[in-house]
Image (cartoon, coloured by chain):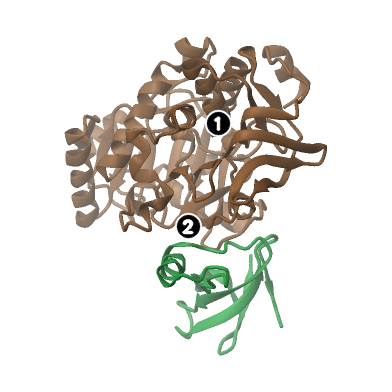
Chain colours: A brown, B green
Amino acid sequence: MNEFVETLLDLQWHEPKSSYDVVIVGGGGHGLATAYYLATRHGITNVAVVEANYIGSGNSGRNTTIIRANYGIPESIRFYQHSMDLYKTLEDDTGCWIMHDTKGLIWLAHTESAMRSERARCQLNTAMGTETIMVDPAEIKQLCPQIDLTGSGRYPVLGASHHVGASTARHDRVVWAYAQGAMRLGVHVLQNTPVTGLVMDGDRVTGVKTATGNISAGVVMSAVGGDVTQFAAHAGVRLPIRTHPLQAFVTNGYAQGFGPIISDTELLSYVSQTARGQMLIGAEYDRQQSFSRQSSFDFLQSCATKVSYLLPFLKNLRIMRQWTGRCDVSSDFSPVMGFTPAPGFVITTGWGTWGFKAIPAGGEAMAELIATDTTPEIIEPFSLNRFATDHSMADQGSTGTR
Amino acid sequence: MLWVTCPLCGHRPIDEFKFGGEIPDVPASITDDAARDLDHVWMFNNVDGVTTERWFHEGGCRRWMTLKRDTHLDRVIED
């Protein structure tokens, strides 16, 4: 975060204390949203959010900001639909402008089997109260005049599902809105404070270790992205997580008014336009696990080729920036939220490529879990023990990954 | 681009290979049989450093191979 941003925001920094009721490790969207809802909904303000770098410097600052709920299993649709609803009112709740913009998302199908998948998606979404409808090629052309319906002769568009309520928001502003709201109510946010370990009392987690000393806590929550396997190992907790890098890039500005978000399972890529007019393009994560945040030319080459089959105008744009985030992909491609085998240690992880859209609902549910010491019904299906009880939430097809 | 030395085909670009994942290694500290099964099926070591993993040479000899890679830097370690 630079000095200019600091002047825009009303962030009240505090001197760290040696003890808090709740310590949240990870100052990204999920960590700060949890702190915000703990303070606003439950009156718990003796809370610290401990961040290794600056707030929003991890995956909250590296995603493609798409907010959608067109998932493939009822538990996920319900959860993400609730998150979308919270996003809609977030500007009123926090008093901060997050540049929330409802655009709709078109998920293209190029084969008959893909059409069947999209029809199934529409049926299930409708049954769960999420507006997703089938559109034919003529309607797609109306929604997005720039599209080449023949897919440059290689990927003809047979139809698509149109998720009407899908939207985008400015990622930094979401993080800042939650940080500002939480800090106003007395939550401490400690930047540049890497957590090096956990303080244990037998099985129980009683605090975190930092370079400047231990901080004790009634409850420690992990909202760590990227290094979560190593972090949870301090408490002896094993996780169903593999960390893969995911790359994205933006082009230079294009005429404003590129309507919807375009997504494609076959080409595994998605395109939207930012508020500045840049075309924001992402693809699936790298095939091999890695903690490297190195961007690659291979990715640019393959992703740019794929998206220009559908949107030929992209060929005339230039690539401005490219970046990489680290995705914690769970075994069943759904998040992991809730209690762990270690008492005093709760976790929100497995956010893979779908974490940004879940920030409000994830934060709200984790705050309720910490405040009431019981798992809220909406995240019950996503608990860590679902693997032991053989209730995995398999939904790879909805994640936009391979 | 990463390059991998396949024992049959030699030095090949990684695009030809399919990632088979880390070789499951359940920690010795887990002793209960059911807990070991659970860990073997669902959990990962997700090592941030040198790890041993399986790769399939899909676009070549179509054989599985084992290789070492440093996941911190995403570099293949040649023996």
Q: Which residue, given by chain and number where applicable, does mark 1 sit on?
A: A29
- Dot 1: chain letter: A
Q: Which mark is residue A278?
A: none
Residue A24 lies, in percent from the top left, at: 61, 34
SS label for mark 1: helix
- For badge 1, the amino acid type reads Gly
Residue A7 lies left or right of residue A144; in this view the side is right
Disc 1: CA contacts within 10 A as few (<14), some (14-19) or many (>=20): many
Q: Nearer the viewer, residue B37 or A136?
A: B37
Q: Which residue is found at the position 68% from the left and 22% from the top?
A: A188
Compared with A86, B11 (above or below) is below
- For badge 2, the amino acid type reads Pro
Q: Which residue is found at the position 25% from the left and 39% from the top?
A: A161
What is the spatial separation of the Cα atoms under label 1 and label 2, in whole angstroms? 22 Å
N-term-proximal mark, 1 vs 2: 1
Residue A307 lies left or right of residue A24; in this view the side is left
Residue B59 lies, in percent from the top left, at: 46, 77
Q: Residue furthest right?
A: A212
Q: Is residue A219 visible?
A: yes
Q: In the picture, residue B42 is in which quadrant?
A: bottom left
Q: Which residue, given by chain and number where applicable, does mark 2 sit on?
A: A240
